[in-house]
Image (cartoon, helix red, strand yellow):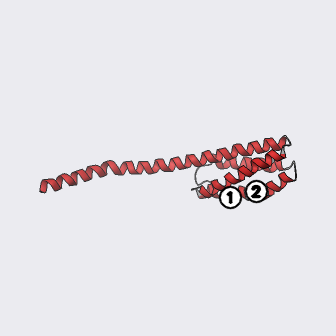
Amino acid sequence: MKTVLIAVALATVAFLVGFVPKYFENQELQAALERTRTQLEISSLHSQLGMILIEIERNNFGNARERSTVFFNQLQSAAQQAQDEAIRRRLEEALQRRDEITSDLASLRPETADKIREMYISLYDVATAGPGSP
């Protein structure tokens, strides 16, 4: 009976010795995966802004407006899902310009391109900043 208990205790210790490091490694990998997904989503948003800018410069305000609707919807989703508070805050700041940009595109204002350029640079900064960066 005593040898069975010792064997069970040793098996439990062996299990924990193997399990605990892998558990923490898994947690680190999950966090890295989430950061990578967030960066990918931000990069996709950044590309969409570039396409909106191209459409404005071509005077295709209708296409730019359609693309901006998709962009802002995805930006809102990204802001809601962002785990990093600094990234969430920066995405929400960009989202606050939705009505202004939409109105400018509907009014066919060429100066909207300058506003989109500002957002493009700001989103680039978010995409290239590390987690927790302001």
- Residue at (69%, 45%) from the top-left corner? 46
Residue 87, horizontal then vertical, whole percent: 62, 54
- Residue at (46%, 49%) from the top-left corner? 28
Q: Nearer the viewer, residue 21 or 78?
A: 78
Q: SS for tag 2?
A: helix
- Residue to which mark 2 is pinned: 98
Q: Nearer the viewer, residue 6 or 75?
A: 75
Amino acid beneath label 2:
Arg
- Residue at (82%, 47%) from the top-left corner? 62
Residue 16, horizontal then vertical, whole percent: 30, 52
Q: Residues within 10 Å of mark 1 (few under 14, many from 20)?
A: some
Give the number of the disc on residue 92: 1
Please state if 32 lies on the left or on the right of 107 as rendered: left
Considering the image in quadrants, where does the N terminus appear? Answer: bottom left
Amino acid beneath label 1:
Glu
- Residue at (87%, 48%) from the top-left corner? 110
* Residue 60 can be seen in this image: yes
Q: SS for tag 1?
A: helix
Give the number of the disc on residue 83: none
Return the disc, 1 or 2, that comes first in the chain's sequence: 1
Residue 33, horizontal then vertical, whole percent: 52, 47
Label 1 to label 2: alpha-carbon separation? 10 Å
Please state if 74 lies on the left or on the right of 8 as rendered: right
Residue 76, horizontal then vertical, whole percent: 67, 56
Q: Residues within 10 Å of mark 2 (few under 14, many from 20)?
A: some
Marks 1 and 2 in Cβ contact (< 8 Å): no
Q: Nearer the viewer, residue 9 or 98?
A: 98
Q: Residue furthest left?
A: 1
